[in-house]
Image (cartoon, helix red, strand yellow):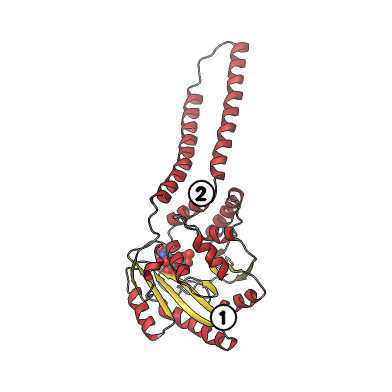
Amino acid sequence: MLISIVAPCYNEEDVIERFHEAVQKVAEDLLPLGHDMEFVYVDDGSRDRTLLVLEKLADLDARVRYVSFSRNFGKEAALLAGLRHAAGDCVVVMDSDLQHPPELIKRMLELRAEGYDQVIARRTRTGDRFTRTLTARLYYRLVNRLVDVELKDGVGDFRLLSRRVVDAVVDLTEYNRFSKGLFAWVGFPSTTFDYENAVREAGRSSWSMRSLLNYGLDGLISFNNRPLRAALHLGFALLLCAAAYTAWIVGAAIINGVSTPGYVTIITALTGLAGVQMIMLGVIGEYTGRIYYEVKGRPHFLVKATNVKRAKDLIP
Ligand code: UDP
Ligand code: MG
């Protein structure tokens, strides 16, 4: 069986060699079991020497394929490129910063042998900051109400996919890719196992609080139209409140006579409702924005350098 390792790399010059050593070691262990391995590294427009290191690795090891983007297109695009190129009977998707322990690949293969199409590694949150853990918990609770595929906390892109799952994911051509959701959407028999989270070996995480927030919003909105439905419900609820309040005011005026104060009520209602309207416009805007990007039909990434011969095929 051929196993492809797909790893996106963005400014990982410090770890990529160590990563390659680690997966090579796993490959050696798997060889007696009759498993071959190929390594598909996608340089996501790194600003450091990542590409040079990858070229060197490819010179030393014929199983290394690399694809380098013309600029930073994001991890989702890098994953797509990697999956498109992976030729394996199954594909292991993992980060190249050694946060995903390569030893777990063996465990994944065992579970794959039991017939699962997706073997998902779920990281525990030990060692994470408390606030981060808490926001993640709350976020997943909210997301699972709004999105119709099930997203689990701690589940990321570290997983083994069978050929048919890879084909299914690659066939989803949407521009706004939220892999976590796409993998869940594809389905097929899946299983999850836990592992202890490792700290980054070198380099820095490219996630700021802001990008996490945006990622979270993407997850909420890129999946279905339930947020629109929620906006609709909110609108109805507000309308009902307004009707009740009007009835109350009119009733009071009939019983007690008309009194003029109400400045605070007016200002509060005005600003409150304006806020709600802005939010709803924002929700609609998000969807329209997504349509805009889909309609443009631009490629997900552009390739600058690669040792893959059929690089042209990578761009549909
Ligand atoms: N990555 C990428 N493109 C980006 C950002 C990140 O390909 O624009 C890669 C990065 O090299 C790493 C993986 O995605 O292999 C996860 O990124 P990171 O470690 O920054 O995220 P975290 O582990 O903090 O979630
Ligand atoms: Mg990381």
Q: What x and y, as percent, mark residue 313?
A: 40, 67
Tell me whether circle 2 and circle 1 mark residues in contact (CB < 8 Å). no
Quadrant location, the C terminus: bottom left
Q: On screen, 234 above or below 298?
A: above
Quadrant location, the N terminus: bottom right
Say what secondary structure mark 2 lies in: helix
Q: Nearer the viewer, residue 311 or 132?
A: 311
Which of the two marks, 2 or 1, is nearer to us in this view? Answer: 1
Residue ID at (56%, 85%): 30
Residue ID at (47%, 79%): 38
Q: Nearer the viewer, residue 80 or 144?
A: 80
Q: Nearer the viewer, residue 173 or 19?
A: 173
Instruction: Report which residue position mark 1 lands on.
Output: 1
Q: What x and y, as percent, mark residue 86?
A: 48, 72
Question: From this viewpoint, which residue is outermost toward the bottom?
Answer: 32
Instruction: Report which residue position mark 2 lands on.
Output: 221
Left or right, 2 with reference to 285: right
CA gap between label 2 and label 1 equals 38 Å
- The label number, if any, that marks residue 157 in the structure image: none
